[in-house]
Amino acid sequence: MIRKWLRLDELTFDREIVAITIASTLLLLVDYYYPLTPVNVVDGLGLYLLIPLAMIVFAFRRPVREYGFTLGDWKAGLAITGTAVLIMAPILWLIGRGDPAMQRYYAWQATKILPLMTFLDLIGWEFFFRGFLLFGYEKKFGVHALWLQAVPFALAHITKPAVETLSTIFGGFAFGWVAWRTRSFLYPFLIHWFVATFTIIVAAGLLG
């Protein structure tokens, strides 16, 4: 009687969806509240790349290529990446030079090893959203996964400048589409790597 009243028989869940949802939420929260090492990029590599890959291989027992860890359609990927860079460069220039909040937030990050730091910072980040979440959710929700992965991506930008954070629901969808189209997280990673690196360079006034 109690079981029927609680409608427990209707509570049937896809185990991978549950695991992905719980794990992704906890990984984001752990990253925010509990620094694991003195180096943020090391934490990011562990939380957003190594742990999801371990779950895919050892818990889900699936090949990592099913989660976008592959070259995918490299011809389309490179074409999309090149086009995105050309479109985004002038937009980033205007925002990076025109928004004081962007300059305050990013200018100090312009170091001699900037490309390496943004690479290490974003490689796990992009796999987490455009690999682990996108392709994990796609198995159950189809193309709706494009929006589903964009929501935590946008929320993870809270504390960053408003002009950036408000755009991330759409940027997250766009990055997701690139991964979905090419079947690889690599190309949104390359685009994001350029966006982050170029934004910091512009905000720091290194290009004049």
Image (cartoon, grey):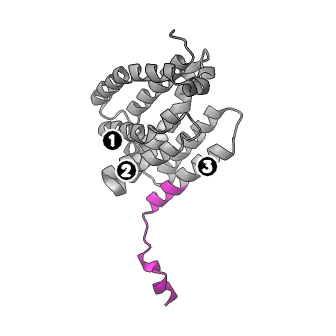
Chain-order first, disc 1 or disc 3 = 3
> Which numbered disc, 1 or 2, marks the residue that appears first in the sequence?
2
Residue 163 is left or right of residue 35, and the answer is: left
Q: Position of residue 97 (x, y in %)?
A: 50, 19
Tell me if label 2 and label 3 are in contact, CB under 8 Å: no
Q: Residue 7, located in which quarter of the rendered image?
A: bottom left
Q: Which residues are magenta?
A: 1-22
Pick whichever of labels 2 and 3 is earlier in the sequence: 3
Specify whether 192 is left or right of 33.
left
Residue behind mark 1:
180
Separation (CA) of disc 2 from disc 3:
21 Å
Neighbourhood count class around disc 1 (C-alpha, 10 Å): few under 14, some 14–19, many 20 upward: many
State the residue position of label 2: 145
Would you say the residues marked 1 and 2 are in contact, meaning their CB atoms lie under 8 Å apart?
A: yes
* In front of the other: 65 or 37: 37
Identify the amino acid type marked 3.
Leu
How far apart marks 1 and 2 lie (CA) works out to 9 Å
Residue 99 versus residue 15: which sits nearer the camera? Answer: 99
Image-quadrant location for residue 188: top left
Q: Where on the picture, by quarter, is residue 181?
A: top left
Per the image, the residue denoted by label 3 is: 29
User: From what the image shows, is residue 52 above or below residue 161?
Assistant: below
